[in-house]
Amino acid sequence: MAVYTQVSAEALASFLAGFDHGELVSFKGIAEGVENSNYLVDTTAGRFILTLYEKRVSVGDLPFFMAMLEHLATDGNPVPRALANRDGVLIHELCGRPACLIEFLHGVSVSQPTAAQAYAAGAAMGAMHESLAGFALDRPNTLGPAGWQALLAQCGDDLDTIAPGLFDRVSTALDGVVSVWPDRLPRAVIHADLFPDNVLMRGDTVGGLIDFYFACTDIRAYDLAIMHSAWSFDDRGERYDAAVGDALVRGYADRHPLSDDERAALPILAQGACLRFLLTRAWDWLNTPAGALVTRKDPLAYWRRYEAYAKDDMFA
């Protein structure tokens, strides 16, 4: 989450007048994340999230995301649905951006998850994948291996302003990962961004899974590898917590069993996940607009993770 587009109190009050969810009491921008503009909104009827979709999210993809969330919620997964206005419309325009009013889910995002929390989160992903087996829609992953190569080219030698020699190191790593990418593994719709800040915990129980705007059709086990890379290291990517990593995989597999081929592919899938997030973080680092209320994230934290996965099999 982040704030790129500023919304006035008057514009938000007018927007809310089209819903049956009370009158505006207060609102504030949410700085976490990097993709869309988000506000925490309190009304006389309760609390909601307002999301304005920025350039990386195509308005044409929004019906896919809304249908996915409705499917998951109907199947009992703790996800936030978009709320319709009095005319039954889910997707609106506010301050020149596509916008949705979204359910607020209770819980906190943990910065240092325990093994018990990781187990619960892994199981929640497994349950989500189980539900999505019955979801009929499809969305290509624009941030798959071809997208990584395009991002590398777009960042170019500017990567070396983040760390000397980074462009050459990433280019070599990317060539190696793409050459052995396990394309034939089972595919399905995946979250593709289930970091700790996208999981709301209530103690050791998952209260919510949020931010589905990278969701796409891709290798199902890749979703688990992304999650493992995000949950199992400290913020700087310097310290690996084996108890958390093992619990995450165990929780997932207890709910949605992994095949032998999927388990064997997890190390290379995790290396790919690290390169994907290194490159998108690097792009944002180099291109975040001045004055945006957004917390930039360190690309090198994912290079350190990549090096750790390339050196050791953490799934053995």
Image (tube, rainbow, N blue to C red):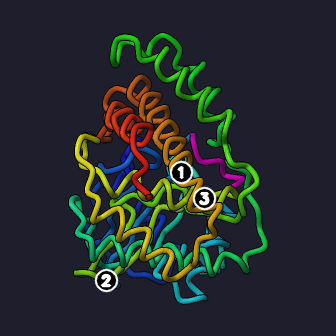
Q: Can residue 10 be seen in this view?
A: no
- Categorize mark 1 by other alpha carbons within 10 Å: few (<14), some (14-19), many (20+): many
**How many numbered markers are drawn?**
3
Could you tell which of marks 1 and 2 lies nearer the N-terminus?
Answer: 1
* Residue 59 highlighted magenta (yes or no): yes
Residue on which disc 2 sits: 205
- Categorize mark 3 by other alpha carbons within 10 Å: few (<14), some (14-19), many (20+): many
- The answer to whether 1 appears left or right of 60 in the picture is left
Residue on which disc 1 sits: 53
- In front: mark 2 or mark 3? 2
- The answer to whether 281 appears left or right of 290 in the picture is right
Q: Give above or below for 232 relative to 117.
A: above
Q: Give above or below for 295 relative to 246.
A: above
**Residue at image x 23%, y 69%?**
114
Q: What residue type is labelled 2?
A: Thr
Could you tell which of marks 3 and 1 lies nearer the N-terminus?
Answer: 1
